[in-house]
Image: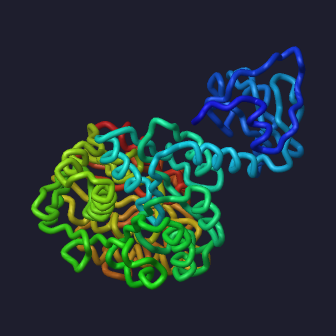
Amino acid sequence: MNPIGLNELQEIVSGVVVGRPELGEPGPVRGVVTDSRRVQHGDLFVALPGKQHHGGEFLSDAARRGAEIAIVGPGGGRCADLVCVRVEDALRALWELASWNRDRCPATRIAVTGSFAKTTTRQMVHQILATVGGAYQSPENFNNHVGVPLSLLGLGRQQSHGVFEVAASGRGEIGPLSGLVQPAAAVLTGLGRAHLGGFGSVETVVTEKLELLRSVRPGGLVVVPEECRGRVADELDESQLVSVGVESAADVVATKVQHRAGKLQFELDGQKFRLSVAGRHFVSAALSAVAVARWCGIGDRVSAESLSGFRTARGRCRVEKTALGTVIDDSYNASPESMLAACRLLSEWRGKGRRILVLGDMAELGDQAANCHGEVGAAVAASGGIDRLWAAGWWAESTVAAAVEAGMPRKATWSADSVEQLLESLPGLLQEGDTVLVKGARRARMERVVERFCRVEC
């Protein structure tokens, strides 16, 4: 971020400075954090209220780690160890700081949203842009009302492009975030049933995501999957719209798509792309990244070379070889659409041993939870290429029952009420040569299953 002194900080957030004079004049702020465990010397600590704790409880910890200034709202605690800027609303102050920093950075801002594959798409866009100059991207999964302003505060004057992930779990969240980012380009990864408990319907999801697409300035770019074009085109400037797809009528079209054992390749207007990623569904993310790159003046050859070195993050269809076999770690999160994509991926996988799908519950589906879990179970049976289905959680038996009803042998299934039970039973269930795909909602913490699998010896 752009360095900022105490006086200017106070003015930006309309705050009142309080603190002990003997602490002296603090140095300029060079970073902003809301988690005291992440504080580095020179960072500003913003003490936000939380569901279980208030950030004000950690002022001393932030000071010990190198913070000299904190922003504190009502109920934010005593400022004994650092200089505090007291404000009426700490979150609003964070947004005001993010807006201030955004306006002082010349980077072209690109925003990525959608019901799935946001992080992978954002990372692919960033990887291409980074090959031709300074590019910045949202750290980790900083994509909500706290993460987006923190991401903007990480942007500096030296970067030419910034790629930001924008998410929502309910109505009315994307609009304000779009206004904060003010993107010159936006990418929609897809529309699905994620967070139905908060949105109520897919139609509401569409309405919410459109808020970001409509926020793109004139002359900008909006990238959407071809299958979503009909749902959003009427609300957008046609001259900005670019669609992507496979063997379709899209503007950016992949042909000759092949996937085998974690290697994906396709052609785009004569240019061959080869990626070390697991799953055909990553074609759309790659095409979206190429569409953004073209808009930024980057040729397809450069994009292909850049993406050849791309590797997905942990928990996002990342392939790991172990002493026992192969694990496809897709544990980070799950929606009905991404679950179905996982089924397709595993059913097409070619290996020596069994293909085993290990599922945790999906979350935030509201009154559609039973139907969605049943749909996934039926899809496992219909795939014809999955040898075992193991499920754990509240909806595990419903998922397994749907698979059995759709034709999967009962002996090929296993279920447990909790992931903990699965972890205890896992060593006795596995065999040498197995290929295991692990997936579930974030709250299920299915990465524990991946870690357990990697520790099992032949």
Is residue 338 something that shows in the picture? no
Measured from the top left, where is residue 422 in percent x and y?
47, 53
- Image point 49% across, 45% down: which residue? 106
Instruction: Locate the N terminus by quadrant.
Output: top right
- Front one among 92 and 219: 219
- Front one among 243 and 422: 243
- Front one among 414 and 237: 237
- Image point 45% across, 85% down: which residue? 234
Q: Is residue 349 left or right of residue 365?
A: left
**Residue 386, placed above or below residue 100:** below
- Front one among 164 and 418: 164
**Residue 249, placed above or below residue 387:** below
Which color scheme did the rendering employ for the protein?
Answer: rainbow
Q: Is residue 1 left or right of residue 292?
A: right
Measured from the top left, where is residue 394 in percent x and y?
57, 66
Q: Hey, which quadrant is residue 177 in on the image?
A: bottom right
Measured from the top left, where is residue 326 in percent x and y?
27, 47
- Image point 54% across, 62% down: which residue? 393
Q: Residue furthest left?
A: 270
Measured from the top left, where is residue 183 in percent x and y?
50, 59
